[in-house]
Image: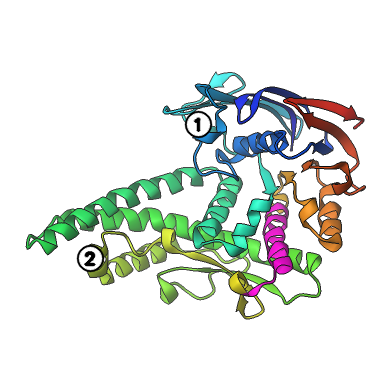
Amino acid sequence: MRVRHLQVTDFRSWEHADLELEPGANVLVGRNGQGKTNLVEAVGYAATLGSHRVAVDLPLIRHGCPRAIVRLAVVNEGRELTIELEITAGKANRARVNRAPVPKTRDVLGILRTVLFAPEDLALVRGDPGERRRFLDELLVLRAPRYAGVRADYERVLRQRNALLKSSGHARRAGAKGDIGTLDVWDGHLARHGAELLGARLDLVADLADHVTSAYAGVAPESRPARIRYRSGIGDSFPPDYGTPGSRADREVLQDALLAAMVAGRDAELERGVSLVGPHRDELELTLADFAAKGYASHGESWSFALALRLGSYELLRSDGNEPVLVLDDVFAELDRRRRARLAEVASNAEQVLVTAAVEEDVPDELAGARFVVSNGEVSRVGPA
């Protein structure tokens, strides 16, 4: 899989940019603030419908403009598809595939798969659990785009149930009963959608875990073994072999466990006015030996773990039979010699890799390929493929 052509209009700092990209390495070099990261961000957005830098779409639209446009031509196994995304302030975004409108923007998911490693990824290790949940869900959607709908359904039900918990809690404190019968109905909806999302995450971690452990050993062989494990608020309510390679979570068992946990915690939920159990409260645990990586890992070990999560994701998607585009956004300057060499080794064997760097010297020699200079609102090809 590769991106043959990228075009953006009024995206971030770019009024317009147009690039013909090559198989293998494509290196964008430019001083900080010139817009090179904005270009690879557009590629990532087409793959995930989200940015690795901001949580909402509005900052992606160039200041003073009503909308931003991202267009890509993606080649996969000899077949080319075009994606066009229109990001509009205050309105629903729109998408086209091969120039034809699609009913939902998320219908473009799966056409392009990317794995992006950026300085922001340090938050995967040092940040709050939401960063790691987002990492899992984005990877989940890259593997199976239908989970974008599953996640959206879960979040919709969660918002409605939280609103009901809040209003019912207020009513109970005022001496009224509240709408408890309706709450039972929403318990069932949340358990059903939650079991589907939770089961998918458990399956994903089971498949990903060995790849992450192996990748970490490759970039930090002198360090303690790295492990990932999914921890759910329903505790040991599901069989303990979930999370081992090849295991698959039973959605019915998970649904029953979620329902039981909601019933047991109803008083606390009514008191606080929020849902206290479900995938939105879960954690992806990162450990070095028996210690939590967050708070225990050194700076170098944290970088290694973040890199291992991305390299593990890359290897997992490759093992699924559809190699993703590898995007390395200004990371070589952050890595020491060993980590840089290991990342360059993986990248040099990728079908396509997009690299950004502030200076040419930051890019390893192994990544010979197309070179682009990004400066003063322009991007120019300067080197052969």
| Sequence-earlier tag: 2 or 1 | 1
Residue 223 seen = yes
The percent coordinates of residue 49 (x first, y second) are 55, 38
Decide whether the magenta segment is chiefly helix, strand or loop. helix
Q: Is residue 347 above or below residue 132?
A: above
Disc 2/disc 1 C-alpha distance (Å): 38 Å
Q: Is residue 158 left or right of residue 33?
A: left
**Residue drawn at 60 percent across, 37 percent down:** 45
Residue at image point 14% right, 55% down: 179
Q: Residue at x 50, y 58 (%)?
A: 130
Relative image position of residue 218 (x, y in whole percent): 80, 66
Disc 2 marks which residue? 271
Give the percent coordinates (x, y) of residue 42: 64, 34
Q: Residue at x 38, y 53 (%)?
A: 193
> Compared to 69, does 175 lie above or below?
below
Which stretch did the figure color magenta? 296-315
Indicate the quadrant containing the C terminus: top left, top right, bottom left or bottom right.
Answer: top right
From the image, which quarter does the N terminus lie in?
top right
**302 within the magenta span:** yes
Q: Nearer the viewer, residue 235 or 33?
A: 33
Q: Nearer the viewer, mark 2 or mark 1?
A: 2
The answer to whether any part of residue 21 appears in the image is no
Taking depth in this image into account, of 121 and 111 the one nearest to the observer is 121
Q: Residues within 10 Å of mark 2 (few under 14, many from 20)?
A: some
Residue furthest to the top:
99
Q: Is residue 155 above or below residue 80?
A: below
> Helix or strand or loop: what does disc 1 sit on?
helix
Left or right of 6, for residue 182: left
Q: Amino acid at mark 1?
A: Thr
Viewed as shown, does residue 110 lie left or right of 371? left
Q: Which residue is mark 1?
A: 105
Residue 271 lies in the magenta-colored region: no
